[in-house]
Image (tube, rainbow, N blue to C red):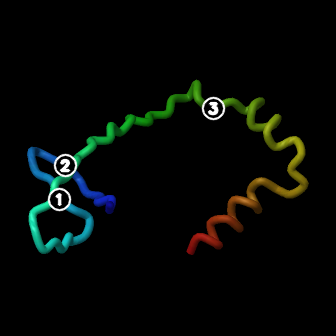
Amino acid sequence: METITGTYYKGRLSRDRPLKVKKPIKILVTLLEEKETRLSISDFSFLGSQDLLKDCKTSFSDEVIDERRNDL
């Protein structure tokens, strides 16, 4: 068994990579619903952030910069 990924849009299914088969095969297609993730100002809390970072021994800004540099 193999998992094939792709995108379904406007009645068409496109695969992320080619599929090579030598004979007809049965398939099962599962459509994954994508949740719309919109953030609002109420999703942010300054006090919550402070609480999450209370045990952080370094500068949060320095950690973000280091993480972004490592992702390059």
Q: Is residue 47 above or below residue 72?
A: above
* Residue positioned 9% across, 45% down in the render: 11
Q: Quadrant of residue 55?
A: top right
Q: Is residue 70 left or right of residue 23?
A: right
Q: Which residue is mark 1?
A: 14
Q: CA distance from mark 2 to mark 3?
A: 34 Å
Task: Compare residues 68 and 33 and report the one nearer the observer.
Answer: 33
Marks 2/1 in contact by CB < 8 Å: the verdict is yes
Percent position (x, y) of residue 65? 69, 64
The mark lying in front, picked from 2 and 3, is: 2
Q: If you read the primary sequence from the N terminus, does the residue marked by circle 2 or circle 1 appear first?
A: 2
Q: Secondary structure at mark 3?
A: loop
Q: At label 2, which amino acid type do we have?
A: Tyr
Q: Which residue is mark 2?
A: 8
Give the label on residue 44, or none.
3
Q: Is residue 64 above or below residue 35?
A: below
Q: At label 1, which amino acid type do we have?
A: Ser
* Residue positioned 59% across, 70% down in the render: 71
Percent position (x, y) of residue 30? 27, 43
Label 2: few (<14), some (14–19) or many (≥20) C-alpha neighbours in 10 Å: few
Task: Compare residues 55 and 59 and report the one nearer the observer.
Answer: 55
Q: Is residue 23 left or right of residue 29?
A: left
Q: Which part of the image, by quadrant, shows the N terminus?
A: bottom left
